[in-house]
Image (tube, helix red, strand yellow):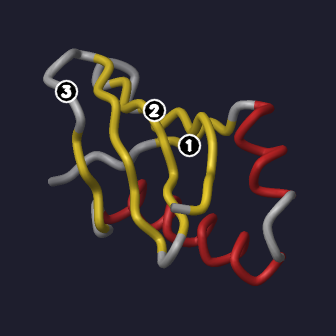
Amino acid sequence: MKMKWSVEWTPTAIESLQRIPWRDADRVATAVYRLAETGEGALYVMSDDLTVTARLRVGPYRVRMTRDVREHVLRIWWVYRA
């Protein structure tokens, strides 16, 4: 059985999400929560540390995050247009 991840948005991530059009922001947030619930998404893992840096692709946007394996938390750092 897969464990679900909790999602933690940093203030910088919330601010960057608020700066993009609301439909795109909704799409990005939905993709992040889908990744947390099911593991589905275009995820690129950037290192092999315990706190793993990853990038999620959502259309023209990228979501930079770290995955805390011990606490099962996806910590979202920022959202940007690629």
**Mark 2 residue type:** Val
Q: Which image quadrant: the N terminus? A: bottom left
For label 3, the SS is loop
Query: Is the residue under label 2 in contact with that under label 1 (CB below 8 Å)?
Result: yes
Where is residue 11 shown, x and y percent of the image?
80, 32
Q: Name the residue tied to disc 2.
A: 73
Measured Cα–Cα span from mark 2 to mark 3: 17 Å
Quarter of the rendering containing residue 14: top right
Residue 32 located left or right of residue 81: left
The residue sitting at 51% across, 61% down in the picture is 82
Q: Residue at x 29, y 68 (%)?
A: 40
Residues packed near mark 1 inside 10 Å, few (<14), some (14 to 19) or many (20 plus): some
User: Could you tell me residue 78's position as x and y percent?
Assistant: 63, 41
Which one is closest to the eye, mark 2 or mark 3?
3
Q: Amino acid at mark 3?
A: Ser
Q: Which residue corresponds to mark 3?
A: 47
Q: What whole-number distance in Å separates the C-alpha atoms at marks 3 and 1?
A: 20 Å
Please tell me whether residue 21 is drawn above or below residue 52 in the rendered image. Answer: below
Which label sits in the foreground, 3 or 1? 3
- 5 above or below 58? above
The residue at which mark 1 appears reads as: 7
Name which residue type carries label 1: Val
State which tag comes first along the sequence, 3 or 1.
1
Disc 2 crowd rating (10 Å Cα; few below 14, some 14-19, many 20+) is some
Would you say 39 lies left or right of 37 here?
left
Viewer-side residue, 58 vs 30:
58
Query: Mark 3–mark 1 contact, CB under 8 Å?
Result: no
